[in-house]
Image: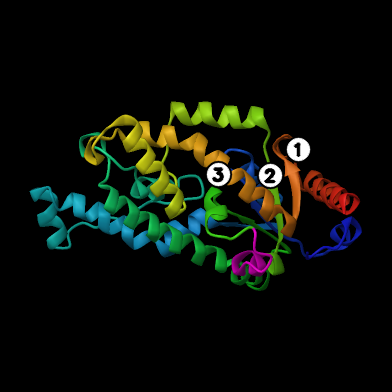
Amino acid sequence: MLYKDADAWRAAKNRRVMVFGMSGLGKTHMSTTLRASGTWFHYSIDYRIGTRYMGEFITDNAKAEAMKVPFLRDLLMSDSIYIGSNITFHNLSPVSTYLGKPGDAAKGGLPIAEYRRRQEQFRRSEISALEDTGHFAERAQRLYGYPSFICDTGGSICEWVDPANDRDPLMTTLSTVCLPIWIKGDAAHTAALIERFDRAPKPMAYQPGFLLDCWTAYLAETGLAEDAVDPDAFVRWTYARALAHRQPRYEAMSRWGVTVTADEVASLKGEADFTDLIAAALERKAAAN
C-alpha cells in the first residue's frame, strides 16, 4: 500500500486514494466532500467514460434517433444543427441511458444482442478510464496544483478484475497509484438499496457470464420470449442477484487497501474527518494482521 500505517498517512503531504463499492453507499458523498475542501482533485470514472470513451457512441445514438424524424434529418444533413450530450459530474444520465436495458422495444428495451454490444463497449471504456487514473493523479498535481487526489470509481469495477489473483493487472496498477478504499454496507444498507432500485430501476453494467446466466434464468422462469421481456422487470429481478454477486468480489479486492463502513462515510463533514477515518482504517488493518 502507498501508506504503510496511520502515521505515514497523516504525515503525507500528497494523498491519493481510490474509492469503490456499490453505488449508493457514499462514494459520491466522500468525493464531493473532499473536492469542496479545495485541495483534492476529484477524478470521476463515470464522467471520464462519458466524455472520453463513450461520448461518440452516445452522440451517434442520439443522431440516429433524430435521423428518423424528417425535419431533424434535413437539419442534420445540412449541418444546421448539432447534437451532443450534456454530461456533468451531477448529470451522468447520458451514459446510463445509452447503456439501456434489454427487452421489449415498445417499453424502451433493446434487443439482447445490441444490449450485449453496448455492455462490451462500457466494459472496455471503464477499464480504459481506470487505467487513466495514474495519468490524472500526476496531471492534477503538475498542472492544477492539487496536493491530493481521489478516484471515484463506478460500482462495476469489481466485474473487470480477478479478485482472487494477487497479481490482477488492474488492481496492481491502481494500488501503486492510490490507496484503495472499500465502502462496506451491511444488510440494512443492502435492503435500502434494493428498495430504492425497485422504485427507480436504472441500467447497470454486468460481467458477461453473470448477464448470460441471469438472462437465461429469467427467460426460463417467466417463459417469455426475448423481445417480450419487460426491461424494468428484468433489471429489478437481477439487481439483488447483482448485489450478492458483487459483495464477495469487493471484499476480496479490499485486501489491496482499507475498508470503511457506509455509516462512517455518511458522517463525513470535511477533510479532517476523512483523514481521521482513513487513519483509523489503517490502524484496524494493522491490528487484524
Q: What is the CA distance from the residue labelled 1 to the residue labelled 2?
A: 9 Å
Q: Amino acid at mark 2?
A: Ile
User: Is 50 part of what is drawn in magenta?
Assistant: no
Foreground disc of the pair 2, 3: 3
Above or below residue 64? Residue 139 is: below
User: Is 169 part of what is drawn in magenta?
Assistant: yes
Q: Which mark is residue 245?
A: 3
Label 3: element kind: helix
To which residue does mark 1 refer? 264
Q: Which scheme is used to colour this image of the protein? A: rainbow
Q: Where is residue 263 drawn, in percent x and y? A: 72, 34
Foreground disc of the pair 3, 1: 3
Q: How many marks?
A: 3
Q: Are marks 2 and 3 in contact (CB under 8 Å)?
A: no
Horizontal side, residue 79 vs residue 30: left or right = left
Q: Where is residue 152 drawn, in percent x and y? A: 60, 53
Q: Which mark is residue 120?
A: none
User: Which quadrant holds the C terminus?
Assistant: bottom right
Q: Where is residue 136 drawn, in percent x and y? A: 60, 68
Q: Where is residue 119 drawn, in percent x and y? A: 38, 54
Horizontal side, residue 59 vs residue 137: left or right = left
User: Taking the image as drawn, is residue 23 in sight?
Assistant: no
Q: What is the CA distance from the residue labelled 3 to the residue labelled 1?
A: 24 Å
Q: Which mark is residue 183?
A: 2
Q: Of residues 267 and 103, which is closer to you in this image?
A: 103
Q: Amino acid at mark 1?
A: Glu
Horizontal side, residue 229 vs residue 145: left or right = left
Give the magenta-colored segment's residue range.
Answer: 164-174
- At x 28%, y 53%, the residue is 114
User: Taking the image as drawn, is residue 17 in sight?
Assistant: yes
Above or below residue 207? Residue 15 is: below
